[in-house]
Image (cartoon, helix red, strand yellow):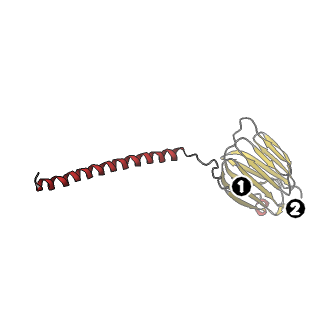
Amino acid sequence: MTKEEGLGKKPLRVFKKTRLGATRIVVIALVVTFVVGGLMAIYIAFKPLSSSSPTPTPQTHTHVVPWQEMAKYQTDYWNVTAKQPYTVSLNDSMTVLSGMQWLTITAYSSNVIIWSVQFINSTYIRYSNSNDYGFLHCNDGIVYVTVNDTAITYTGATSYTSSPAGVNFPSLAQIQTENGDGNFNGGHLDVTLTS
């Protein structure tokens, strides 16, 4: 073998070994990457989700009906949207010159009445929903109406729950406040919706 042949072949052999070695290293690196990546993907896919889901923040809307509107026998319309479950707090501080208030608060979904509360005076109301109606004593003119898909609960000094079979209460769209027959001269109605 001549000196030139030896010089020409040695770098070629070294180059081939280096190239094959580099190729093997790249192939091994790719295989390791795919395996590790696959294991990570499997780990992520099978990692158990947290059992405690975040609790949605309750949305609160408020509305005030002054006594002056009821004194003129006007109807107050409050357009407010809420899906079940929701709670409406009715805090009635209105006063009348004499007799009873007959202040009526009615919740609608489109043209359908969902529920209705009538303050006769500060401690006595009449309620109704679907085919249920009755009377309820309340504390200081405060009544809570809690609605879910199939039932309504009125809470004052005592509570009454109605769950008629097959009833599905629709979403709330409007709350109307009317003067049934009261001679109002003071106070207001505070309505708070939490959903």
Q: Nearer the viewer, residue 22 or 13?
A: 13
**What's the residue type where badge 2 is placed?**
Leu
Counting from the top left corner in percent of width and height, residue 4 is at 11, 56
34 on left or right of 109? left
Identify the residue at horizontal 85%, vertical 53% (top origin). 138
Alpha carbon of mark 1 to alpha carbon of mark 2: how far?
Answer: 29 Å
Q: Nearer the viewer, mark 1 or mark 2?
A: 1
- Which disc number belongs to residue 193? 1
14 on left or right of 99? left
Q: Which residue is mark 2?
A: 97
Q: Nearer the viewer, residue 116 or 12?
A: 12
- Circles 1 and 2, Cβ within 8 Å, touching? The answer is no
**What's the residue type where badge 1 is placed?**
Leu
Counting from the top left corner in percent of width and height, residue 80 is at 66, 54
Circle 2 packing at 10 Å, graded few (<14), some (14-19), many (20+), is few
- Which disc number belongs to residue 144? none
Counting from the top left corner in percent of width and height, residue 170 is at 67, 44
Say what secondary structure mark 1 lies in. strand
